[in-house]
Amino acid sequence: QNKLDSAIRVAEDGVTAAPNFEPLYLALSKLYFNQGKVQEGLAMMERASKIAPEDPEIWQSIGMIMFQFQRSKTQSNND
């Protein structure tokens, strides 16, 4: 957990230092998702999509995350 927290701090510093470098937002979003912070992860994906709206990887990732989030939400409601 400490390593993940440290990685998030480094990525957040990177985003602050280079706010138009979309790979940092993608990396930070994955770190947030690994911590279970879905909303924060999606926010980083959305920022990346504004920087590079033509990047299909971003949109594919957003779609997959939204699908998984909705799926887990539906499963929770059925339990």
Image (cartoon, rainbow, N blue to C red):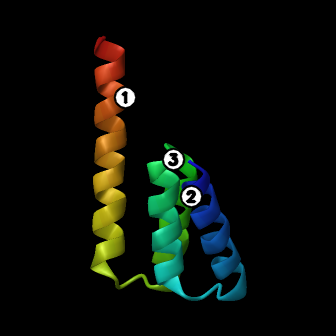
**Res. 50 in view:** no
User: Which residue has dot 3 on it?
Assistant: 35
Mark nearer the viewer, 1 or 2: 2
Q: Tell me: 52 left or right of 39.
A: left
The image quadrant of residue 7 is bottom right
Q: Do the residues labelled 1 and 2 touch (CB within 8 Å)?
A: no
Q: Residue placed at 50% from the left, 76% from the top?
A: 48
| Crowd class of label 1 (few under 14; some 14 to 19; many from 20; radius 10 Å) | few
- Circle 1: element type: helix
x then y, percent, for residue 63? 31, 57
User: Which residue has dot 2 on it?
Assistant: 3
User: Which residue has dot 1 on it?
Assistant: 73
Mark nearer the viewer, 3 or 1: 3
x then y, percent, for residue 35? 51, 47
x then y, percent, for residue 27? 47, 71
- Label 3 and label 2: CA atoms lie apart by 11 Å
Q: Earlier in the sequence, mark 3 or mark 2?
A: 2
x then y, percent, for residue 75? 29, 23
**Res. 73 in view:** yes
Looking at the picture, which amino acid does disc 1 mark? Lys
Q: Which of marks 3 and 1 is nearer the N terminus?
A: 3
Q: Is residue 64 above or below residue 19?
A: above
Q: Residue placed at 35% from the left, 85% from the top?
A: 54
Q: Tell me: 17 left or right of 61.
A: right
| Crowd class of label 3 (few under 14; some 14 to 19; many from 20; radius 10 Å) | some
